[in-house]
């Protein structure tokens, strides 16, 4: 089979969409090129070897040893390795988050992910170590096995992305009320200077998201606007004006208590520029 035709097969092509850089795509293409050397009796063994190395490289990229060691859940489990492969895979799935931060169902999905990874690695290893049993696969059998391998490979990477996405959604949802309360209080304090009596009528968070996760903190960023009433003059001879103030904010919390949010960096910035125009 020609390389161009092999790369056009849906299962084979799909894996490319989960590879994040040119190096990984080149390695995958190299593995497929090995498979296409039809006169070579160990072509499939070469393919399996390169795919095993690609899998290892992806895990190393997603879970660098030094990053894993910074996670609060990390502890040394092996005399031989600073970080075990299982710990790297755990980091790939949950990053710096503690188990207490995660929904109950995440642990089960991570266990399934670990089993799928072990299954794929075992299948690749069968052909990486050349023996009479695993040498010179018949073309049809080799092709079916190749499709099976790339489907599992894609599924593993998809599962990782889904786990991280669901964790992010759950964390964002869990702090929604805290974010709102924090902004309501801060906006009251920041808008006092605009009038003799400033009444905040409503605080509206248009969007916010978990923007990044660092070894010691979780950081949220977002924006919205405050509707307020500005009052001037005395009770009997006063004037009231409606005013809208857009804002942006950065909040952070630690892993021991995700909901214990505090302003971080620039904090909450209210854009009062229109008031002075």
Image: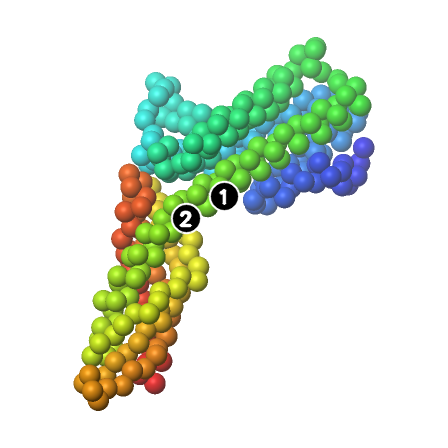
Quadrant of the image occupied by residue 141: top right
Q: Judge from the rendering whether residue 206 lies leftward or rightward of residue 25; answer left or right.
A: left
Q: Nearer the viewer, residue 184 or 43?
A: 184
Instruction: Note whether 129 is above or below 157 in the view shown.
Output: above
How far apart, in angstroms, are the residues tagged by discs 2 and 1? 11 Å
Q: How many marks?
A: 2
**Residue 213 position in % (x across, y down):** 38, 46
Instruction: Note whether 212 is above or below 58 in the view shown.
Output: below
Instruction: Identify the residue under disc 2.
Output: 172
Q: Nearer the viewer, residue 237 or 222?
A: 237
Q: Quadrant of the N terminus?
A: top right
Q: Judge from the rendering whether residue 180 lies leftward or rightward of residue 54; answer left or right.
A: left
Q: Residue at x 42, y 47 (%)?
A: 173
Q: Nearer the viewer, residue 88 or 218?
A: 218
Instruction: Identify the residue under disc 1.
Output: 165
Residue positioned most to the top = 132
Q: Quadrant of the C terminus?
A: bottom left
Residue positioned most to the front = 236
Quadrant of the image occupied by residue 189: bottom left
């Amino acid at each position: 089979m020609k390389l161009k035709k092999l790369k056009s097969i849906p299962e084979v092509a799909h894996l490319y969409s989960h590879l994040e850089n040119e190096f990984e795509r080149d390695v995958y293409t190299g593995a497929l090129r090995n498979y296409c050397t039809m006169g070579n009796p160990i072509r499939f063994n070469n393919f399996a070897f390169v795919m095993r190395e690609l899998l290892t490289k992806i895990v190393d990229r997603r879970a660098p040893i030094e990053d894993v060691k910074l996670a609060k859940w990390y502890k040394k489990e092996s005399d031989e390795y600073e970080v075990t492969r299982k710990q790297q895979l755990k980091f790939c799935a949950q990053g710096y988050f503690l188990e207490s931060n995660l929904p109950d169902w995440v642990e089960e999905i991570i266990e399934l992910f670990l089993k799928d990874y072990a299954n794929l690695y075992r299948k690749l290893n069968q052909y990486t170590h050349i023996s009479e049993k695993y040498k010179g696969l018949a073309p049809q059998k080799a092709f079916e096995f190749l499709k099976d391998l790339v489907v599992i490979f894609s599924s593993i990477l998809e599962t990782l992305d889904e786990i991280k996405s669901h964790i992010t959604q759950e964390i964002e949802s869990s702090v929604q009320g805290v974010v709102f309360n924090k902004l309501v209080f801060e906006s009251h304090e920041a808008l006092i200077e605009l009038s003799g009596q400033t009444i905040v009528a409503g605080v509206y968070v248009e969007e916010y998201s978990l923007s990044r996760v660092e070894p010691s903190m979780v950081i949220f960023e977002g924006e919205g606007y405050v509707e307020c009433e500005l009052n001037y003059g005395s009770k009997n001879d006063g004037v009231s004006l409606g005013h809208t103030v857009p804002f942006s904010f950065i909040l952070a919390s630690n892993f021991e208590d995700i909901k214990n949010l505090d302003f971080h960096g620039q904090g909450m910035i209210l854009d009062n520029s229109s008031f002075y125009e």
